[in-house]
Amino acid sequence: TRVITQRRRPRGMPVPEDFAEAELPLAAPAAGQAVVENLWLSVDPYMRECMDAEWELGAPLEGRSIGRVVESRSAELPVGALVFHREGWRTHAVVAAAEVRVLPRYEGVATQSFLSLLGGTGLTAYVALTRIARLRAGETVYVSAAAGGVGTAAGRLARLLGADRVVGSAGSPAKVRLLTEELGYDEAFDHRAGPPLPEQLARVAPDGIDVYVDNVGGAHLEAAIGAMREDGRIAWCGAIAQYNAGSAPAAPRNLFDLVEKSIRLEGFLVSRHRDAQAELEEFLVPHLRSGRVADRLHVTEGFERTVEAFLGMLRGENTGKAVVRLGHD
Ligand code: NDP
């Protein structure tokens, strides 16, 4: 199997030389195991944090992926089954039935959606809106990193859950156009250009915001707190602005606004909310099937371009969920 390993710990933005590719022999599957050929790999922001300490240098990396069973010693994993598992960044893996999910085949729904709207990405957005922020019909929602994986999902879901106004920020004029023209956002702004964030937010949400889905942290969080209405809720998903920074951000400086406006700020990890998966599928599959919601993926072709896909996502080159395609199902 071809695998990608990490060679050294990055300082700031990682570079291709921080990684290496290697060929490893694949162990024969034991009883209860199967060999999986990976078809799709997910590249995610949390992996940048894994690079600082969690990932062992020189060892194959982990990541969410979808593969096809090509050899099996498990009745639960028949040859040909498509499975979701966590041994990404490699072309083949040996997995046990208990470690994987055999994916259901929903007519009209692409397999790769299980790494996007129907995967951890969609689940993060769903949990943020329903369980953390408890969005109510008629409210105004603001999403940062709105053109990314979680962001595109949050925009779609907010609308389906009854939000009255959905606004977002993203890092280029092309993304801003896409948000309003294709991804269902009412208004959007470019956070890398133009006036300061509070001014831009005041323009797109003149009456304030009720719910903020925060993917960025730092100055974005400070601007959103300033723009929140009374009884607003902030679902804090991530802080991509600080993953490469090497030090804690100075903002938000206005935390006392939470008291004055009775705002609730709550961080969460989607791994603690796996029980919402069935609910998400029940809710979204009919919309995916009818075409009311289209999943948006940013596909990089070829295993050898996995590192490029990961670094491109950190730089903001993706619109929609960043994935790598290794083969066809
Ligand atoms: P995205 O697809 O959103 O990709 C990351 C995006 O972040 C880029 O496209 C870029 O878009 C934006 N970005 C990069 N650097 C900056 C910066 N300095 N300031 C502002 N924006 C920046 O990734 P995901 O959808 O996978 O993840 C989004 C967020 O959700 C991350 O913070 C991630 O950690 C978090 N997350 C949290 C989970 C949880 O359990 N809590 C689970 C999954 C994700 P642009 O061009 O618009 O700047």
Image (cartoon, rainbow, N blue to C red):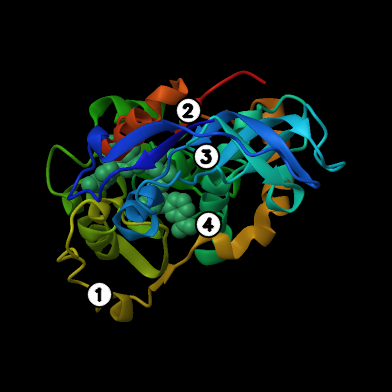
Separation of marks 4 and 1 at Cα, in angstroms: 21 Å
Q: Residues at badges 2 and 1 in contact (C-beta under 8 Å)?
A: no
Residue 126's x, y, as percent? 57, 52
Q: Quadrant of residue 256?
A: bottom left
Left or right: residue 17 versus residue 288 is left
Say which amino acid is labelled 3: Gly
Q: Nearer the viewer, residue 68 or 160?
A: 68
Q: Nearer the viewer, residue 9 or 131?
A: 9
Question: What residue is shown with label 4?
Answer: 129
**Which of label 3 and label 4 is nearer to you?**
3
Q: Earlier in the sequence, mark 4 or mark 1?
A: 4
Q: Earlier in the sequence, mark 3 or mark 4?
A: 3
Residue 324 is labelled as: 2
Q: Is residue 170 visible?
A: no
Left or right: residue 326 versus residue 186 is right
Q: Earlier in the sequence, mark 2 or mark 1?
A: 1
Separation of marks 2 and 1 at Cα, in angstroms: 39 Å
Question: What residue is shown with label 3?
Answer: 88
Say which amino acid is labelled 2: Val
Residue 269's x, y, as percent? 49, 62
Left or right: residue 242 versus residue 234 is left
Residue depicted at x 30% and y 29%: 317
Say which amino acid is labelled 1: Leu
